[in-house]
Image: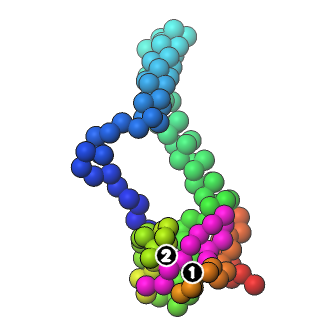
Amino acid sequence: MTTPTRSGKDYLRITLADFIVFPFYVLLTVASVERGYHWYGWRGAVGGLLFVFILLPLAAYAVGILACLIYFGIPNPPCRTGKCRSDNYQRRVFDKGGYALFCGCGTPYRKRRGRFYEVQPDGSLRRYMVWKAFRGWFPES
């Protein structure tokens, strides 16, 4: 599945999240280096810097992976024909409005709350797979 990217002037636009999160990250870096230096000298300063630049991002990454394993069902299941895998899905605009995930075969799917639906020609959703935490995708009965 490909994610939409920012292009042109939108790439240079600063979002509200960027505006809020980056200064807090800088303050956290300065505070951890200062506290580490104050308590343990230059070794503490280096330790504080390593903590902020290595351990915190790794912890956030681990929490994200854990959330995917429990709630979100990533990667996506194979398509109904079994020919297309998770990386073959493309998010495109659906002709009846909204977005859908199209597999390499051209079949549209939608994903909602741990369930994967096949979009029928009339726009209705047909249950296809359900995500079970730490176990993966299973056929919906």
User: Nearest the camera: 43 or 65?
Assistant: 65
Q: Secondary structure at mark 1?
A: loop
Where is residue 101? Give x, y as percent.
48, 73
Asked which secondary structure carries label 2, the reply is loop
116 vs 105: above or below: above
Image location of residue 52, percent across then percent down = 48, 30
The residue at the point 27 percent across, 52 percent down is: 7
Question: How crowded is the residue under tag 2: few (<14 C-alpha within 10 Å), some, or many (20+)?
Answer: few
Quarter holding the N terminus?
A: bottom left
Name the residue located 75 percent from the left edge and 84 percent from the top edge.
Answer: 141
**Residue 110 in magenta stretch:** yes
* Left or right for 115, reference 141: left
Tell me whether circle 2 and circle 1 mark residues in contact (CB < 8 Å).
yes
Total number of numbered discs in the rendering: 2
Q: Is residue 37 above or below residue 112?
A: above
Q: Measured from the top left, where is residue 19 in percent x and y? A: 42, 30
Answer left or right for 112 relative to 10: right
Q: Could you tell me which residue is drawn at 56 percent across and 73 percent down?
A: 110
Residue underneath mark 1: 123
- Whether 101 is drawn above or below 4: the answer is below
Magenta-drawn stretch contains 32: no
The label on residue 96 is: 2
Residue 40, numbered label: none
